[in-house]
Amino acid sequence: MSEQQNKSNVYGIVVTVLLLLSAIAGYFFWQKSQSYRDQKDKAQAEQKTLAAEKAQLTAELDSLAMAYSSVRTENETLQGRVNSTAALVEQKQLVIKQIQASSAKDIEALRAQVAELKKVKTDYEAIVKGLQQENADLKAENTRLAGENTELKGSNANLSGQVQDLAKQLEEQIRKTQSATFRATAFRVELERRGDKLTTRARKAREIFVSFDLADVPQAYQGPQKLYMVITDEKGTPIPSENPTKATIYAPTGPVEISALQVKPVVLEATQRHSFTHKFDDRLKAGNYVIAIYCDKGLLGASSFRLA
């Protein structure tokens, strides 16, 4: 009886130990399962939050795009320059479209998309803010210039005759050189002083920005070309420059010698807008000036401006 009792006690202990081990193992696996579920729930919650944030950022970027379009239109009306910001915004829009078109396969990809959208939003806000400030400056400058123009009307009684002489000189230049088979139109001429403010005062003019359209360029002229910018006074004398470019233009009426302030290699397409930016060696004197744009085949177009 004693031996059987001992065996029974041993069995009891073994069973108790096994039950205890089973309980410990069950608790361990339950904890691990619970932790996995918690992590999965947390990841799902974060994914939902990121998806909502992505949608919110996309909506905010749409609003910023509309705001940019508005300030850009105002900027162009005020004769501002938006070429650089337009190219940058186009890049940002491409990034936004790529993100909108792609679906995030995992949470890491979604995090990366949200981070990229935040960066684009920050850049967009800076562009819009910068244009708004430029527009405010242009409005103030236009108001000042309007006041100066009112004063000039009373003090410059001979301005009309000077403008007529300038127009005749411009017409004579066009008649002599003849135009190429395509033309430069929609000229915009801006003179700037230190601080990037527009001016019409000769003593403040440090830099000139000239832009124009080339439309309906014949197929034969498309491709690599050179554009020349020539600036003369109202007597047809080129303004002084330390390094002018001498060139011969083969116009329909014959070769024409020019002295260009700047030469720009371009690749012409059917329609495009081009520009020149030139810093003067010396400040321009007050008077009337003519800007002429040439290619190797002749005069493309011309415009005039006046400095008081």
Image: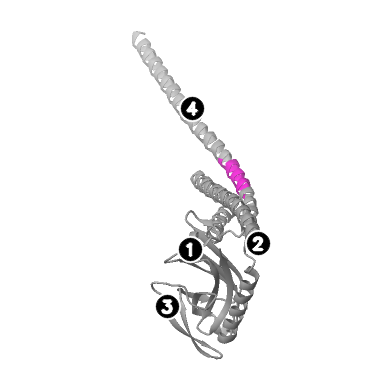
Query: The C terminus appears in which quarter of the rendering?
Result: bottom right
Which of the two labelled residues, at mark 3 and mark 4, occupies the earlier sequence position?
Answer: 4
Q: Amino acid at mark 1?
A: Glu
The answer, for residue 160, to whether it is visible in the render is yes
Label 4 sits on a secondary structure element that is helix
Residue 150, position as x, y percentages in the image: 65, 58
What residue is disc 3 on?
A: 245
- 286 versus 32 height, above or below: below
What residue is disc 4 on?
A: 30
Q: CA distance from mark 1 to mark 4?
A: 77 Å
Magenta-colored segment: predominant secondary structure: helix
Question: Residue at position x 39%, y 73% from top?
Answer: 243
**Residue 8 falls in image quadrant:** top left
Residue 136, position as x, y percentages in the image: 60, 49
> In this rendering, which labeled residue sits more in front, label 3 or label 4?
3
Q: CA distance from mark 3 to mark 4?
A: 85 Å
Q: Are marks 2 and 1 in contact (CB under 8 Å)?
A: no
Q: Amino acid at mark 3?
A: Thr
Q: Amino acid at mark 4?
A: Trp
**Residue 83 falls in image quadrant:** bottom right
Structure colour scheme: one colour
What residue is disc 1 on?
A: 207
> In this rendering, which labeled residue sits more in front, label 1 or label 4?
1
What residue is disc 2 on?
A: 153
